[in-house]
C-alpha cells in the first residue's frame, strides 16, 4: 500500500515572468481520474497553507474513516493579488493544465480562505462550467469598496466587475453547481455579512447554496476548526 504524499511543483511562469510553485496532496494508492480541489490561500499566505492546515493528516484520516472520497488537493501560490490581472491567466493557463496533465484528473472543485475565498468565487462565477463545487471560507467579499483595497482593482468599476456579490447577479449558474459559504460571527472584517448577502442572491436564483455562521474570528484557527466540514463538502 502506498502512502499519501505532498508533491511540490515548481513553475517557471511565462505569464508572470518568474518562478512560482504549488503543493499537491496526493492520496494513498493514487489512481488517475481523481477529482481535484484547487484551494486558495489568503493575502499573507502561499502554497504552504497545505502544511499550516495539516491537510495531509486530516484528509488521510477522513479517507481512512470513509468520511470523504480520495481527491487531489492543489494549493497554488497566488501571492497578494486577489487572483486578478496576470494571475488569472497564470492559474487557468499554467497551473490547471500542469496539474491535469501530470495527474490526469477529472472534475474540478475550487475553494479558498479569506482573499482566497474571493478568488475561488470570482473564478467560479466567471467560469461556471469549469467547477462543480465552490467554497468561500471567511471570504473577503464586501458590498462597499474599502479605500485600502482600491489598488487591487484600479477603479471602482473594476471592483464591481470582479466582486462575487455582483457577478452572481448576471453570471450563468449551472443547476449542478454547489456552493458552500461560511464565516465566524466575530470575523473582524465582517465577512459574514458578505456571505449572507451572497447566499441570499444565490438562493434567489435557485442555486444550491449553504451558508454557515459559526463562532470564531478571522483566523487560521477558525479554518482548522472547520476543515473537516470543508473536505466533506468537496469530497463527499
Image (cartoon, grey):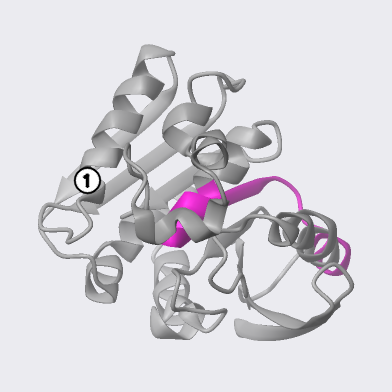
* Magenta stretch contains residue 17: no
Image coordinates for residue 82, horizontal then vertical, percent? 54, 59
Residue at 24%, 34% (x, y): give it. 196
> Which type of secondary structure does the marked residue at label 1 adopt?
helix
* 176 is higher (above) or lower (below) than 13: above
Question: What residue sits 49% from the left and 40% below the top?
Answer: 156
Q: What residue is disc 1 on?
A: 192
Q: Quadrant of the N terminus?
A: bottom right
The residue positioned 62% from the left and 20% from the top of the image is: 172
In the rendered structure, the answer to whether residue 7 lies left or right of residue 156 reads right
Question: In which quarter of the view is residue 212 placed?
Answer: top left
Q: What residue do we see at 49% from left, 35% from top?
A: 160
Asked if the magenta segment contains residue 107, the reply would be yes
Q: Is residue 43 visible?
A: yes
Left or right, residue 27 beside residue 19: left
The vertical placement of 45 against 122, above or below, is below
Q: Is 53 situated above or below 212?
A: below
Question: How many other residues sit within 10 Å of disc 1, few (<14), some (14-19) or many (≥20)?
Answer: many
**Residue 221 is drawn in which quadrant?**
bottom left
- Residue situated in front as seen by the camera: 235 or 165: 165
Residue 103, horizontal then vertical, whole percent: 80, 66
Check the image and report above or below for 168 versus 13.
Answer: above
Residue 89: x %, y % from top left: 78, 56
User: Which residue range is magenta in the image?
Assistant: 100-120
Picture coordinates of residue 44 (x, y %)?
44, 78
Q: Is residue 164 left or right of residue 36?
A: left
Amino acid at each position: 500500500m502506498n502512502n499519501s504524499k505532498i508533491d511540490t511543483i515548481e513553475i517557471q511562469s511565462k505569464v508572470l515572468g518568474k518562478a512560482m510553485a504549488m503543493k499537491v496532496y496526493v492520496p494513498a494508492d493514487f489512481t488517475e481520474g481523481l477529482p481535484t480541489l484547487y484551494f486558495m490561500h489568503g493575502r499573507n499566505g502561499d502554497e504552504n497553507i497545505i502544511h499550516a492546515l495539516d491537510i495531509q493528516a486530516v484528509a488521510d484520516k477522513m479517507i481512512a474513516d470513509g468520511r470523504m472520497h480520495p481527491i487531489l488537493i492543489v494549493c497554488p501560490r497566488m501571492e497578494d493579488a486577489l487572483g486578478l490581472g496576470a494571475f488569472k491567466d497564470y492559474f487557468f493557463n499554467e497551473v490547471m493544465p500542469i496539474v491535469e496533465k501530470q495527474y490526469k484528473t477529472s472534475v474540478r472543485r475550487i475553494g479558498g480562505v479569506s482573499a482566497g475565498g474571493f478568488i475561488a468565487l470570482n473564478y467560479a462565477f466567471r467560469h461556471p462550467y469549469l467547477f462543480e463545487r465552490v467554497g468561500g471560507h471567511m471570504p473577503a467579499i464586501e458590498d462597499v469598496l474599502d479605500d485600502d483595497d482600491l489598488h487591487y482593482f484600479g477603479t471602482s468599476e473594476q471592483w464591481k466587475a470582479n466582486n462575487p456579490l455582483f457577478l452572481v447577479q448576471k453570471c450563468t449558474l449551472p443547476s449542478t453547481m454547489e456552493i458552500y459559504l461560511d464565516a465566524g460571527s466575530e470575523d473582524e472584517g465582517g465577512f459574514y455579512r458578505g456571505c449572507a448577502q451572497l447566499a441570499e442572491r444565490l438562493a434567489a436564483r435557485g442555486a444550491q447554496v449553504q451558508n454557515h455562521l459559526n463562532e470564531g474570528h478571522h483566523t487560521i484557527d477558525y479554518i482548522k476548526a472547520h476543515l473537516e466540514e470543508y473536505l466533506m463538502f468537496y469530497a463527499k
